[in-house]
């Protein structure tokens, strides 16, 4: 007889703007295909090269409304006062039931909602090595105007203060290193190689 599958524990990755959450998640996806990473639903149209079901689930406003009404989202939010984004509940629950390492990569607002809907998850805070490094990364992206950068940096100050709400902190010195620490947490549900010491933020 085979042993029953032990459900896995959801890992929720969040952190301030420009800290590299998406880059770390992409590294995990590329190097560890055994890890299931949630795909968000969004009401915005696909950008060139984006594939439905891979980058996002692209849905209409009516479909998103139905998902909210049917309690089909673990969390959702309006982003940049425009499109809505959310995490479909059923794929997450299915991955966990199969015993797969499972992860959400979301913003702080979403993480707080998930704490209410799935309080048993492990909440991991990704933070930069220093404030100066966070500024350098945000400016280096070159994707925002000066006004937008200033707004995001003000937001980042508040977001960094949320670290105490999380179970574990990983400092993103280097993407692959941070990704491996994250995968170790998923595999062993422990806290290897994780830094908790304060930095000059």
Image: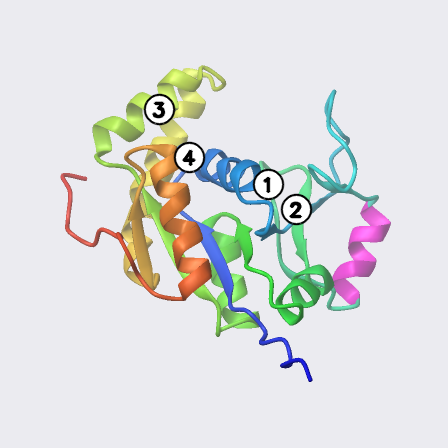
Q: Are marks 3 and 4 in contact (CB under 8 Å)?
A: yes
Dominant secondary structure of the magenta stretch?
A: helix
Q: Nearer the viewer, residue 94 or 39?
A: 94
Q: CA distance from mark 2 to mark 3?
A: 24 Å
Q: Is residue 47 visible?
A: yes
Magenta-span inclusion, residue 63: yes
**Residue sitting at x 39%, y 45%:** 180
Left or right: residue 143 versus residue 16 is right
Left or right: residue 100 versus residue 94 is left
Q: CA distance from mark 2 to mark 4?
A: 19 Å
Q: Which label was assigned to residue 137?
A: 3
Q: Are marks 1 and 2 in contact (CB under 8 Å)?
A: yes
Q: Which residue is mark 1?
A: 79
Q: Nearer the viewer, residue 32 or 53?
A: 32
Q: CA distance from mark 4 to mark 1?
A: 18 Å
Q: Is residue 19 visible?
A: no
Q: Nearer the viewer, mark 4 or mark 1?
A: 4
Residue 103 place in picture, x, y as percent: 54, 55
Magenta-span inclusion, residue 145: no
């Amino acid at each position: 007889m085979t042993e029953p599958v032990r459900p896995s524990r959801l890992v929720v990755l969040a952190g301030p703007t420009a800290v590299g959450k998406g880059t770390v998640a992409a590294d995990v996806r590329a190097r560890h295909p055994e890890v299931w990473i949630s795909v968000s639903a969004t009401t915005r149209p696909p950008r060139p090269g984006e594939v439905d079901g891979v980058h996002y689930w692209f849905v209409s406003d009516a479909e998103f409304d139905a998902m909210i009404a049917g309690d089909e989202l673990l969390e959702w939010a309006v982003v940049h006062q425009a499109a809505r984004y959310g995490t479909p509940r059923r794929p997450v629950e299915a991955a966990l039931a199969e015993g797969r390492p499972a992860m959400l990569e979301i913003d702080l607002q979403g993480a707080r909602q998930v704490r209410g809907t799935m309080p048993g998850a492990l909440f991991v805070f990704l933070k930069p090595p220093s404030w100066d490094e966070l500024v350098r990364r945000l400016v280096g992206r070159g994707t925002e105007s000066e006004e937008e950068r200033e707004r995001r940096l003000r937001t980042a100050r508040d977001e960094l203060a949320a670290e105490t709400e999380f179970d574990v902190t990983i400092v993103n010195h280097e993407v692959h290193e941070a990704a491996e620490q994250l995968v170790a947490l998923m595999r062993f549900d422990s806290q290897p190689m994780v830094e908790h010491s304060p930095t000059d933020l």
